[in-house]
Amino acid sequence: MNAQVIADIADDNPIRIEPLSAHIGAEISGVDLSRPLPQPQIDAIRAALLKWRVVFFREQFLSHEQQVAFSAQFGELTVGHPVFGHVEGHPQIYSIAKFRKATRFEGAPLLRPWTGWHTDVTAAVNPPFASILRGVTIPPYGGDTQWTNLVIAYEKLSAPLRAFVDGLRGVHRFAPPAGASGTGAFEQAVKDQPLVSEHPLVRVHPETGERALYVSPGFLKQIVGLAPRESQVLLELLWEHVTRPEFTVRFKWEPGSIAFWDNRSTAHLAPTDIFDLDFDRQLYRTTLVGDVPVGPDGKPSVAIQGSPVGAAAAVALN
Ligand code: SIN
């Protein structure tokens, strides 16, 4: 059987969408992201994003300006990062360098199977709805990124547990990992720009109506109303569940690769094996302004500290 799905947009510009696993991830080819896309291609990419949660492109050697212009076809861009800033001269670009000062810690944090998994900026009341990551300097081996599908994770819970988590909410905040040392830069950034929000544990996707287990392991600290031990045990069970390998896809980067993912239905894991290798790794990320999550009961998230993540100031595109 040919697993490749052909989206016949028009005879002269077909695009191909090739699924990479049962539940998440598809590679899209037949598009040139360095130029404005025809509307049917934008629609096809958006539909693939909703279906496959993360889509990948190869051999798209974009400049910062071209990455911004590509991203802007799918929504308004946020500032590079609301806490850690942006690339000088490029307010919408966030540098994902190998040795990011704010996120690389000395010492040995308490490692669990879900350590490092997160959904982008869920400490904000309106986390970016999508992220677009462009690979520039890529190690010859190592440095893969993984994503997981939070909708299938929700659907694969037992019915009684789904009913229980449907009514719960959790507090998300920026904080260094437990047990890590050398966290001064991170702590200072968080002190300057505190971000804490309460989100539903189950988020209704605003475009598809699907329910997602919205349990960003890196940010979610406490389930509201539960005793600390109850909260810890339930969160660990949910985090272990959402990172089950069959819900995930693993992407091997090349220079010119782009990953475009839906933060409303995924969590992802940045690699740590790169710190065991001498190779450099440099990627650049843009994020698109998101709405305020809503739970199955229709109740929206609330900000506890910090402002919503707004659009970055417009810059001239060419
Ligand atoms: C991210 O968490 O957005 C970066 C992922 C990566 O470095 O692969």
Image (spheres, rainbow, N blue to C red):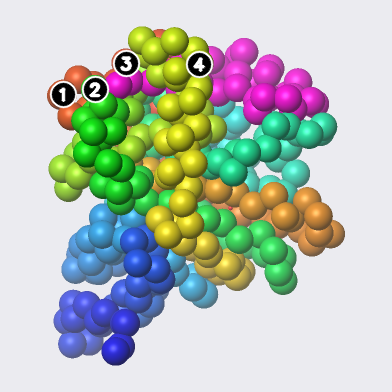
Would you say 154 lies left or right of 83 here?
Answer: left
Q: Where is residue 23 drawn, in percent x and y?
A: 34, 61
Q: Which of 24/283 is in front? A: 24
4 or 2: mark nearer the eye: 4
Disc 3 from disc 4: Cα separation: 24 Å
Disc 1 from disc 4: Cα separation: 25 Å
Residue 153: mark: none
Q: Amino acid at mark 1?
A: Asp
Disc 3: CA contacts within 10 A as few (<14), some (14-19) or many (>=20)? some
Q: Residue at x 36, y 10 (%)?
A: 225
Evaluate if marks 3 and 1 touch, with contact meaning CB atoms under 8 Å apart.
Answer: no
Q: Amino acid at mark 4?
A: Arg
Q: Which residue is mark 3?
A: 302
2 or 3: mark nearer the eye: 2
Q: Which residue is mark 1?
A: 297
Disc 2 from disc 3: Cα separation: 15 Å
Q: Amino acid at mark 3?
A: Val
